[in-house]
Image (cartoon, grey):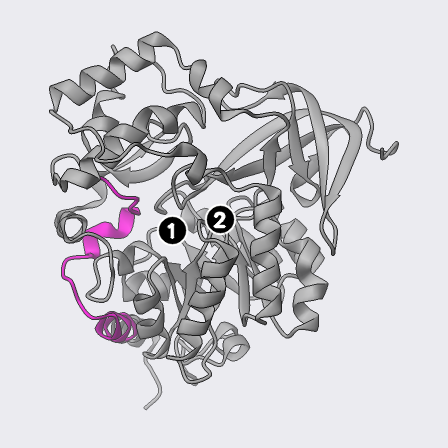
Amino acid sequence: MDPARAGKRAECDGGGLVMGSRYAARQEFTGTLTGEYYDEGDPPWRWYKMIDLTRKPNNYPFESVWCEAESLFPIDE
Amino acid sequence: MTQDPLHTKLCDQLGVEFPIVSFTHCKDVAVAVINSGGFAVLGEAMHTPEDIEADIKWIRERVDGKPFGIDLVLPASAPAESSLDEITAQIPDSHREFEQMIMEKYDVPMPKESVDLHQWGGLSQALGRAQLEVLLEERVPVIASGLGSPAFLLDAAHERGSLVWGLVGRTRQAKRQLESGVDAIIAQGFDAAGHTGDMGTLSIVAEVASIAGDTPIIAAGGITTGRHLAAALCLGASGVWTGTLWLACRESDIDMIIKERLVESTAADTVWSDSISGFTMRVLKCPWTEEWKKPEAPRPLASPYQMILSSDYIQGANDARRPDLMTEASGQGVGFVTEMLPARQIVSDMVEEALGVFDDLVGLPD
């Protein structure tokens, strides 16, 4: 947990590889960070969990999203 | 004018003759551009770590020590929960019926083999990480991230002598990456092939260049000529990132049918559509994209649902090699891709035209 991030609203300039293709695709989210994070590998590649999504791609099927730390932009700060 | 306008800080950073970066998925194109005085970045996002290692070796054996880059799609977000089987089961019947209507209307053959979506996968953080380990281990001269921020690997890359480039679609992403110390920023505009941000190339290149300081900016999106190269340098870029330009070149390994379509196409033959993947991306128009634009069409689904829906059409069209059905990502600069030229000639033509533009504008040194 990262208490400093918990409850903070943020935007994520997210995205990933389009499944089945070799193309990248951007996806933008706005929501609230829970403060949960995990690090992938070393050097650490940090990911934060965002919920209560008020902006997400059309028909995005999930309630939450993991956001790469450097792709997060805090709002209301 | 007192100096060569095409000798930029990007040339100095890389030790290359021309500030032309080829982004390609074809190793032969990459090698040809590198050996013609340009620079090439090989897209390896869909490759396994083992394949990437082999490709790096293959290129090194053919470029006589010259630098090259590898591009990965580092994800910037990932669903917190996902099961492909559950997702597939959630596709509405109305969308399945529309897919079937298109398949029947255009007599699209079913794929020769079932499309294995699990094998395709998405790019998980773990796989991205494993791919990166290869690039670090191999000390690849340039590591480029086609989406997510590469900031977390900067120290590790620099310790190994690798440069790190990030591709951005928004100025705030560039600012964040510049603050973290990336070695170059690729500013990609709306004209580009595939998925782009919504800022035009003119706007984003100028904006990012205005905040970049000494960090080279590489302009991307719709760039296919020497005039584009000259314009990009005038905007403050130190080089250009070109993709569509190489798809139809002689060394390119894409299907000849697609090459012929690209050569015949103009910007008007491209479409920004979310019907293929659920993400908006610029591709050549095809019956699939056009049917989904009609008023009676259902709204395309999000990714990955829409990709699952379109997969039989795409694979069936490719298996049958039907020119009337096939599509490919293509930028708006495709109208200038009018011949299947060798990569060396494309580099040479681009340089000559750009120099001609500068000569017309301000005169060149003898």
Q: Which residue is nearer to you in this view: B237 or B133?
A: B133
Disc 1 marks a residue whose amino acid type is Gly
Disc with the residue nearer the chain's start (1 vs 2): 2
Q: Position of residue A48 (x, y in %)?
A: 73, 35
Q: Position of residue B48 (x, y in %)?
A: 48, 53
Q: Position of residue B309 (x, y in %)?
A: 33, 23
Residue B316, label in figure: none
Q: Position of residue B226 (x, y in %)?
A: 29, 66
Q: Which residue is mark 2?
A: B204
Magenta residues, as a range? B327-351
The residue positioned 64% from the left and 26% from the top of the image is A30
Q: Residues within 10 Å of mark 2 (few under 14, many from 20)?
A: many
Spot the residue most to the right: A3
CA separation, marks 1 and 2?
10 Å
Which chain does tag 1 point to? B
Q: Which residue is nearer to you in this view: B213 or B298?
A: B298
**CB contact under 8 Å: marks 1 and 2:** yes
The residue positioned 52% from the left and 79% from the top of the image is B12
Instruction: Using residue B311 as the reference point, say whether residue B285 is left or right of it.
Output: left
Spot the residue most to the bottom: B366
Residue B60 in view: yes
The residue positioned 41% from the left and 55% from the top of the image is B220
Q: Is residue B270 magenta?
A: no
Q: Which residue is nearer to you in this view: B34 or B128?
A: B128
Q: Is residue B268 above or below residue B85?
A: below
Instruction: Using residue A72 as the reference point, say whether residue B227 is left or right of it.
Output: left
Q: Is residue B273 above or below residue B47?
A: above
The residue positioned 57% from the left and 25% from the top of the image is B82
Q: Is residue B329 magenta?
A: yes
Q: Residues within 10 Å of mark 1 (few under 14, many from 20)?
A: many
In this view, the mark in front (1 or 2): 1
